[in-house]
Image: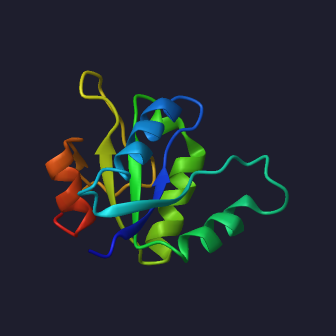
Amino acid sequence: MTKKRVFISFDIDNDLGTKTMLVGQSDFPDSPFQFKDNSVKAHLDGDWKEKVRRRMDNVDVVIVLCGTKTHTATGVAAELKIAKEKGKAYFLLWAYADKKCTKPTSASSSDKIYEWKWDTLKKLINGAR
């Protein structure tokens, strides 16, 4: 099985732990994806958005991990906008089952936030959305 290369966009200030768990799932024997890259902070040298654009050139799908403060995460909004501009497949994923999660401001009104269950995640990675 060829694994999809995944970029994970997430609120690094609030959702690093859940991103780490998602990356860990890429090691499962039946995982349909491999972790390729993730969100960056604006403190990187030069134009960080250009660095994100280049990183997204090497991925098949973008997972937007939605936490409780994602609507305030300007970096996540910018990364989703870049994914859309590049025509990358993407989907929004609930970071927490027991908390109200929010969409990034650049999400479309029709973008659904999917429940983070292993079987659902595998289907989403393979295009079921």
Residue 11 x/y as whole percent: 53, 39
Name the residue rendered at 65%, 51% in the picture. Answer: 40
Q: Position of residue 107 (x, y in %)?
A: 38, 54
Q: Position of residue 129 (x, y in %)?
A: 18, 63
Relative to residue 110, is residue 76 depicted above or below? above
Q: Which quadrant of the figure has residue 124? A: bottom left
* Residue at 37% across, 53% down: 26
Farthest right residue?
A: 45
> Is 37 on the left-hand or right-hand side of 89?
right
Identity of the residue drawn at 52% across and 36% down: 72
In the picture provided, is 34 more to the left or to the right than 55? left
Q: Residue at x 53, y 28 (%)?
A: 14
Quadrant of image for the N terminus: bottom left
Where residue 123 appears, as percent x and y from the top left, is 17, 60
As rendered, which of 50 and 20 lies closer to the eye? Answer: 20
Question: Is 122 drawn above or below residue 5 in the view shown?
Answer: above
